[in-house]
Amino acid sequence: MRTYAGHSSPVASNDLYRRNLAKGQTGLSVAFDLPTQTGYDPDHPLARGEVGKVGVPISHVGDMRALFEGIPLARMNTSMTINAPALWLLALYQVVAEEQALAEGADPVAAVRSLTGTTQNDIIKEYLSRGTYVFPPEPSLRLTTDLVAYTVAELPKWNPVNICSYHLQEAGATPVQEIAYAMCTAVAVLDAVRDSGQVPPERFGDVVSRISFFVNSGVRFVEELCKMRAFVALWDELTLQRYGVHDPRQRRFRYGVQVNSLGLTEAQPENNVQRIVLEMLGVTLSKDARARAVQLPAWNEALGLPRPWDQQWSLRMQQVLAFESDLLEHEDLFAGSVVVEAKVAALLEGARAEISRVEQQGGAVAAVESGYMKSALVASHARRRARVESGEDVVVGVNRFETTEPNPLTADLQAAIQTVDEGVEGDAVRAVQRWRTERDADDGGRRAAAALARLRTDAGSNANLMAASLECARAGITTGEWAGALREVFGEFRAPTGVGGTVAGGGVTGGEEPDSGPGRAAAELAAVREMVRRTGEELGTRLRLLVGKPGLDGHSNGAEQVAVRARDVGFEVVYEGIRVTPDRLVAAAVAEDVHCVGLSVLSGSHLVLVPQVVEGLAAAGAGDVPVVVGGIIPEADCARLEAAGVAAVFTPKDFGLTAIMSRIVAVVRAAHGLEPLHAAEAAGDLDRY
């Protein structure tokens, strides 16, 4: 039983972990901030505004010591949501475990071999969804392989990779795609480990037995339950037939769950509680396909960072199910169900067909590099959003049953979420600079330089990189220095955005009366297309929209859907993908002579990054180009952004992409002194919406 937690600083996060453990939490799930996840120190320019926002910053072994102060790692089960630098963070974790053992007079080797937990370490899904990749796919998979091989030999209780279908569902995956792409990723990892020669063939069953999965559980209870049963069956089949693992215990499908955060709503957020409970049941009721670990989001995650009290509520949900109900006391309740068996069979058939399509392209890595999987996910997400917009898919409190009583939980919105002190970043910057200075004071930095030199040399060879990384950790190397050395050898990578391959209209089609769901959605889309056309005609050029992801926030699903819908209504769209500096966004806006800049920020760094873009446009002589912003932005921050010159702010309650496009056209017209033009006027037969 875990809650995903970490923020501000190692000391503050350590205090939170201790309190959570005292409340009955049985394991830790560490959230790292975006600079740590992408291999930067707090004083790197790209870390600006991101330090400590969505997790804890860990820059060196001293930070890791502080994070786990008073928490005995040899007896703790720790999950770390870390991918590109997973090998590095585990090296830091191991060194701290050794230090703790020595301080207690225990054997450090035995302490290391007793470490229990998981490094997420699934780099494939980073190119498809979360966006915290650093290096190109091939060297990234090499880092994954090295970590798997090392842990099988030295940390036998550690799960070295957590294949993640969770983020695929958030990126738009259907259950079939979720199963298929997760299995393709597992095949890529297992094939790479086998082909590396680092693990003897007779021990390959140990590799398979240490592979775990991290799965999303959505609100469609029956479908999610059947999806998990399909996962279990397909993994058993794959590991037996492809890899010849005959021990059924080694073929077990071992998975943990974070139930779906994508479906949590800003509107009527109290409804999120029942959504979370229903999603939890989907992965606990079926004993033959039950999760081994569950972590639940908090009811207010669509509003901002949950407080400790909110996390406690989510923990109590699990405890009530486990200790008050009898749901865990019986054999599988769904064995022999005709309905369940038919649904599982259909999911398996679809997943096998999609796996075959990926394999025909050369496997998961090739399908990442070609953009095939990313385009498929963006298209699926577009169709899902279209169903919500049209009302075909009902979301209570959002597109139906919208009337509501005042919510006492959010009466004081500033008190309903946790905020990160703005001084956290400055403290972290000064701390990492002081660390480097003190580290190098005794020997002039010779040990640190030697450790980094060895890392570069090993990266250019076939050596397992864990040994060099452990020496870097002991020498006091920082996260940015470790990743920087590997960037010199491996290079960097920009993944395909997937925006160019989606269906027209985001899946919105006509064929029904204009006042009904899909029919009205198609009519509204046509009306906004006419608004875009007429505005472009009046300005003498096609309207151009720059969609930008400033900072390190890699959750690009929203930005991609905005880009797709903007193109569908007639905008020329400029979108380079994730991790773009404000300066680069300004330069692109000027070079492309865009009519509007649309920024997407979900990491809480909007108050730092967005004003940089506004000020940069003004300095570049493009201050008349309006800026609009979307993301998880508290109401008070909306006012601050507008005061800083932002023309419009969109939050999760603004779920209608076509309506957003209409407002962007209005912003463009106002910026050019044109008369307002509403969709009703453009279409001639629609009410203004």
Image: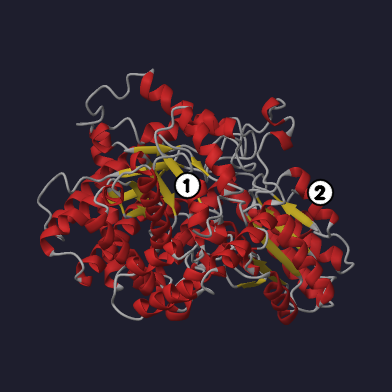
Q: Secondary structure at mark 2?
A: helix
In this view, the residue in front, 484 or 586, is 484
**Residue 269 shows in this picture:** yes
In this view, the residue in front, 381 or 68, is 68
Categorize mark 2 by other alpha carbons within 10 Å: few (<14), some (14-19), many (20+).
few
Q: Is residue 221 left or right of residue 239?
A: right
- Residue 186 in which image quadrant: bottom left
Q: Mark 2 or 1 closer to N-term?
A: 1
Calculate the distance from the C-alpha at mark 2 to the C-alpha at mark 1: 32 Å
Up the image or down, 290 lies above or below 445; here it is: above
**Which residue is denoted by mark 2 in the rendering?**
639
Q: Is residue 197 left or right of residue 510?
A: left
Up the image or down, 293 lies above or below 562; here it is: above
Residue 630: x %, y % from top left: 68, 55
Q: Amino acid at mark 2?
A: Ala
Up the image or down, 3 lies above or below 491; here it is: above
Q: Which mark is residue 295?
A: none
Q: Amino acid at mark 1?
A: Val
- Residue 259 in which image quadrant: top left
**Which residue is denoted by mark 1 in the rendering?**
30
Q: Secondary structure at mark 1?
A: strand
Q: Colour scheme of this structure image?
A: secondary structure
Q: Which residue is drawn at the image coordinates 39% and 31% (left, top)?
A: 281
Assess whether mark 1 and mark 2 are in contact (beta carbons under 8 angstroms).
Answer: no
**Residue 685 shows in this picture:** no
Residue 225: x %, y % from top left: 33, 38
Q: Which residue is drawn at the image coordinates 52% and 48% (left, top)?
A: 66
Q: Which residue is drawn at the image coordinates 52% and 32% (left, top)?
A: 19
Residue 56: x %, y % from top left: 55, 50
Q: Is residue 659 left or right of residue 342?
A: right
In this view, the residue in front, 549 or 203, is 203
Q: Is residue 270 left or right of residue 25?
A: right
